């Protein structure tokens, strides 16, 4: 979907449409007061205080009608420049605007836009007449805390979208409907992949048997791939002492995102938010020579981060996650080769999952933010220069983003455009000169001297939780055969005549490591076939007289209505080849 915020024409249209919305609301609700109405990627919204009145989804129709009335009246939209004193006088009855104005610097020219009897603060630009705002749609209404602070009043937020023509609007609405149908939370419930419960708590998802099957396949897939690349996998505790994170530096930079300290006897323990401190100690467990490096330590590790209850979202944003994590301990002369290997592994995985819409981002620190990052200019300059040089030498097409680095070093982020238009960081590769220093990590070089290794942090699938959310939305829940929770569904036409042969087929498929379901319920054939399609099972076998008598198989692939008859051996070969090639 198009990013409204980044398109100059659409940005202007949606800025103007936000004011059109506020204008209509002011006509219908004279006591309304307005906070902000910005343009966002998906269109625009306006936060409104209506005192005790509540706008519902049903009320959007009458607001739309009033907006269309204003559009039809073709009101001129005029830009007005105001001094701070003039602005305070005009908006003296609106405390939200007063707050905005009073926080503006002295001497600043304040701009507002006026259309007929409505005026509002805005930097603009806007279109010159309301007549140009014909093609809009109000999408939904929700609540939002004033200034995003849960201690403040909840305002009513109305979302909308505006385009230059009806065709673009209709296409966008169709895209929104598609995104709604792809929502991993909706599909996760319908396909029985995962669940949550208020007794467990927000952001703590439970993987149901079908979802657990997919996750197990993902774990086996990436562990096998990493093992072939020379990774050694470990298991480390989900707890760590406060001192561990003080040593790593995470305590100073990350403690607000961690769960509270658990004090027991004389110990202070926390649930770990990341795995690198543990892996530093795994490396330090024994001495190393320059000949031993690189050492690649991997782990499929559960981590815990305190997300506000209002921020958690399905599997995409959770409080407990499982990371596809690894740390590479390398000599400085190995950095380029190892980063290259990580990039090649990322690209190999993306090919297997048919991921094509991605870009590389070099995430750097913000030099003006001394609190967010470890304060060592020399270290940062060295790390950023090193990583930039490696990416340039690898001929990677990347862009730079200031302020997106980890607190200990710069990183290469792979930004994925999801099927519903979200820009998601999936894979990362980070260069770190800091943690080897803080944990006093060494190896013996060719001269017999103790020197520091460099650490490369990397995650290929990111977290299995977020990757699963991405995968559900990308496939609409129709997983490729190798990942599907149920790969084959067997439906006997009549249990009395066809069940025995169906059971033979079930056992044959199980013996070939195929995940199979035999639907022997006393239901009509058509109902069972439709349900098999609804569950998005890759292959449905329909077993009747012909199949029983000829010892063959008739199958339908998900997404087609064609029925194909083959021998049992041919079908097994088809399944094995499809699974092996990850088609």
Image (cartoon, helix red, strand yellow):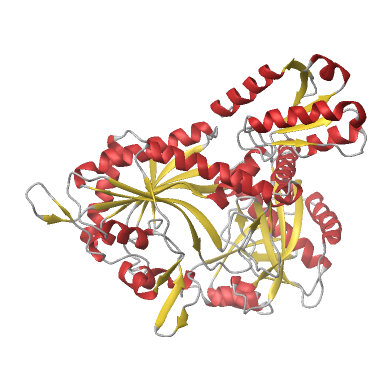
**Number of numbered tags placed on the structure image:** 0
Q: Is residue 392 above or below residue 147?
A: above
In-front residue for pair 447/16: 447
In-front residue for pair 552/277: 552
Q: Quadrant of the N terminus?
A: top right
Rendering coords of residue 289 (x, y %):
17, 49
Q: Is residue 266 above or below residue 139?
A: below
Rendering coords of residue 563 (x, y %):
79, 19
Q: Quadrant of the C terminus?
A: top right
Residue furthest to the bottom: 265
Q: Residue at x 36, y 44 (%)?
A: 231
In-front residue for pair 98/317: 317
In-front residue for pair 409/348: 348
User: Does residue 327 show up?
Assistant: yes
User: Does residue 420 show up?
Assistant: no
Q: Is residue 16 left or right of residue 522?
A: left
Rendering coords of residue 146 (x, y %):
63, 73
Q: Residue at x 84, y 16 (%)?
A: 549
Q: Is residue 238 above or below residue 3?
A: below
Rendering coords of residue 237 (x, y %):
44, 64
């Amino acid at each position: 979907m198009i990013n409204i915020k980044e398109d100059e024409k659409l940005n202007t249209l949606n800025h103007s449409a936000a004011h059109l919305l506020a204008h209509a609301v002011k006509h219908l609700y004279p006591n309304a007061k307005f906070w902000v109405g910005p343009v966002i990627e998906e269109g625009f919204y306006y936060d409104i205080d209506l005192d005790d009145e509540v706008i519902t989804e049903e009320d959007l129709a009458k607001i739309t009608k009033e907006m269309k009335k204003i559009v039809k009246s073709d009101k001129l939209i005029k830009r007005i420049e105001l001094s701070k004193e003039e602005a305070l006088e005009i908006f003296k009855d609106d405390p939200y605007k007063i707050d905005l104005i009073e926080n503006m610097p002295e001497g600043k020219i304040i701009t507002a836009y006026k259309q007929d009897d409505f005026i509002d603060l805005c930097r603009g630009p806007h279109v010159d007449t309301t007549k140009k705002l014909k093609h809009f749609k109000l999408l939904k209404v929700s609540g939002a805390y004033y200034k995003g602070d849960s201690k403040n009043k909840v305002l009513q937020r109305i979302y909308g979208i505006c385009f230059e023509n009806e065709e673009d609007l209709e296409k966008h609405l169709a895209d929104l409907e598609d995104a709604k149908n792809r929502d991993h939370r909706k599909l996760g419930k319908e396909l029985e992949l995962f669940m949550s419960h208020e007794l467990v708590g927000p952001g703590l998802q439970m993987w149901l048997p079908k979802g657990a099957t997919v996750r197990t396949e993902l774990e086996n897939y990436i562990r096998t791939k990493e093992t072939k690349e020379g990774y050694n996998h470990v298991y480390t505790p989900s707890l760590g002492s406060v001192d561990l994170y003080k040593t790593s530096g995470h305590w100073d930079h990350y403690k607000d995102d961690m769960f509270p300290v658990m004090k027991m006897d004389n110990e202070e323990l926390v649930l770990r938010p990341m795995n690198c401190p543990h892996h530093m100690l795994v490396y330090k467990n024994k001495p190393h020579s320059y000949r031993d490096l690189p050492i690649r330590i991997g782990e499929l590790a559960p981590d815990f981060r305190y997300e506000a209850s209002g921020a958690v979202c399905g599997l995409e944003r959770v409080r407990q996650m499982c990371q596809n994590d690894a740390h590479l301990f390398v000599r400085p002369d190995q950095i380029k080769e190892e980063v290259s290997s990580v990039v090649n592994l990322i690209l190999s995985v993306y090919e297997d999952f048919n991921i094509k819409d991605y870009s590389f981002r070099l995430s750097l620190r913000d030099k003006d933010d001394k609190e967010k990052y470890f304060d060592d200019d020399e270290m940062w300059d060295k790390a950023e220069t090193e990583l930039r040089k490696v990416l340039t030498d690898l001929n990677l097409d990347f862009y730079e983003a200031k302020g997106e680095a980890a607190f200990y070093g710069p990183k290469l982020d792979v930004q994925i455009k999801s099927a519903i238009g979200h820009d998601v960081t999936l894979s990362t590769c980070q260069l770190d000169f800091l943690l080897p220093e803080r944990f006093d990590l060494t190896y013996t070089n060719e001269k017999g001297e103790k020197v520091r290794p460099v650490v490369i942090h990397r995650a290929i699938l990111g977290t299995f939780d977020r990757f699963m959310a991405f995968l559900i939305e990308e496939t609409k829940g129709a997983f490729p055969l190798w990942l599907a929770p149920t790969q084959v569904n067997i439906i006997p036409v009549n249990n009395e005549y066809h069940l025995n042969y169906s059971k033979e087929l079930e056992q044959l498929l199980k013996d070939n490591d195929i995940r199979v379901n035999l639907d022997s319920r006393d239901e009509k054939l058509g109902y069972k076939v439709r349900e098999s399609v609804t569950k998005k099972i890759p292959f449905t076998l329909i077993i009747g007289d012909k199949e029983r008598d000829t010892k063959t198989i008739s199958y339908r692939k998900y997404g087609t209505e064609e029925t194909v008859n083959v021998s049992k051996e041919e079908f097994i070969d088809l399944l094995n080849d499809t699974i092996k090639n990850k088609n």
